[in-house]
Amino acid sequence: RPKLTGPELLCQLKDKVEVVTLTSDLQPFSSLPWASQLPSKQLTSDLGPFRTCAVVSSAGSLHNSGLGKEIDSHDAVLRFNTAPTSGYEKDVGSKTTIRLINSQVMASDEHRFLSSSLYSTGVLVAWDPAPFSANLTQWYNKTDYPIFTQYQRYRKLHPLQPFYILHPHFEWQIWQRIQDNMAEPIQKNPPSSGFQGTVLMMSLCEAVHVYEFLPSRRKTELCHYYQRFFDAACTLGAYHPLLYEKNLVKRMNRGSERDIYTHGRVTLPGMSALNC
Ligand code: NCC
C-alpha cells in the first residue's frame, strides 16, 4: 500500500470523516423523555464557519510558551477537558469558543463538572469511547462513562449554554483514517480528544493552528501545563493511538519545521479550503 502524501491524507479526511452530533430527532433518542434537551440542529450548522482557529493542546510544553496573545488572535479557540485559562493567560490565552470534553470528565467527582465555572464558557462538545461497531442503542445502554445522565443534569443547570454530543461514528471514522495509513495494527481505542478536536476545527474553520500537539523545543515530561504531574505517556500515548495521530498531523502540516520547533505550531487547512 503506497504511503499517502499530506494533500492526499487531507482529502481522505475530508472525504471520509463527517462531524455528526446527536440531535433531538435522532432514534433512539427521539423516543426518550429528555430528547428535547438535545440540540435540534447539527453543531456544524449552528456554529461557524470561522476564518482562523486555534486548537490548544493541554501539553506541559505550553508552560512558559508566551503564546497566549497569538492564540487569542484567532476567531475561535478550542480547548480540552479541564484545561484552565485563568492564571495561565500568558501561555494559553483567555478565549474559549469551544471546549471538547471526554465523558470521564463529566462523570468523575474530582472534576466537579456540574458545579465548576470552568465549563461555563463557550460551547461544550462531549464524546464517549463507544464500542467500535455498536449501534446507537447498544452504546446508549452501555456507555463507557454515564455521559447521558450527566448531560441531562448539566442541561438542567445550564439550559442556555450550547452543548453537543458527538456521534460515535466520528471517533471511529477518524480511528479508521489512522489505521488505514499505518503499516501496523494500532490499538482499538478512540483517538485522543486532541486529534478529534483538530478534525472538528478543520470542519468549522478555513485555517487551523494546532499548538503543542507536535511538541516544540519546550518538550517536557510534564503532562499538562496546569498540573505538576510528570508522565511521558501524556505526550506519547498509552490508551489513545496518540503517536500515530501525531505522525498523521506531521504529514498534513502545511507550516514549517521551524514553526513546530519554536511555537509548537502546526498549520492545517480547513476542509472548505481544500480542492480535492
Ligand atoms: O490529557 P488530556 O487528554 O485532557 O489532554 C488533551 C489533549 O491534549 C493533547 N496532549 C495532552 C498532553 C500532552 N502532554 N500532550 C498532548 O499532546 C492530547 O491530544 C490530548 O487529547 C483526552 O484525550 O481526553 C485526554 O484526557 C485525559 C483525562 O481524561 C482528562 O484530562 C481529565 O482529567 C486522559 N488522562 C487520563 O485518563 C488519566 C488522557 O489520557 C487523554
Image (tube, grey):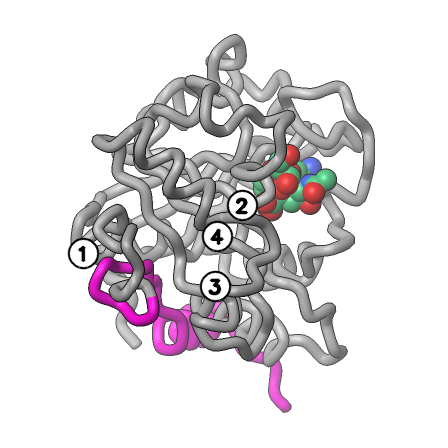
Q: Which residue is drawn at 21% across and 65% down?
A: 25
Task: State the SS at label 2.
Answer: strand
Image region (quadrant) for ligand 1 = top right
Q: Is mark 2 within 8 Å of ligand 1?
A: yes
At numbered mark 3, what does the secondary structure look like: helix, strand or loop? Answer: helix
**Residue 39: image x %, image y %?**
23, 50
Does residue 5 belong to the magenta stretch?
A: yes
Q: In which quarter of the image is residue 51?
A: top left
Residue contact between numbered discs 2 and 1, judged by CB atoms under 8 Å? no
Q: Who comes first in sequence, dot 4 or dot 1?
A: 1
Of residue 276 and residue 110, the one placed in the foreground of this image is 110
Give the residue number, with chain letter if any, for mark 1. 41
Q: Which segment is the magenta one? A: 1-28
The earlier-in-sequence mark between 4 and 3 is 4
Residue with the mark numbered 3: 140
Which residue corresponds to mark 4? 127
SS of the residue at dot 1?
A: loop
Query: Where, by quadrant of the figure, is residue 166 drawn?
Result: bottom left
Q: Which amino acid does label 3 sit on?
A: Tyr
| Three-letter residue code for mark 1 | Lys
Residue 79 visible, this angle:
yes
Name the front one of labels 3 and 1: 3
Taking depth in this image into account, of 115 and 77 the one nearest to the observer is: 115
Mark 2 belongs to which amino acid? Asn
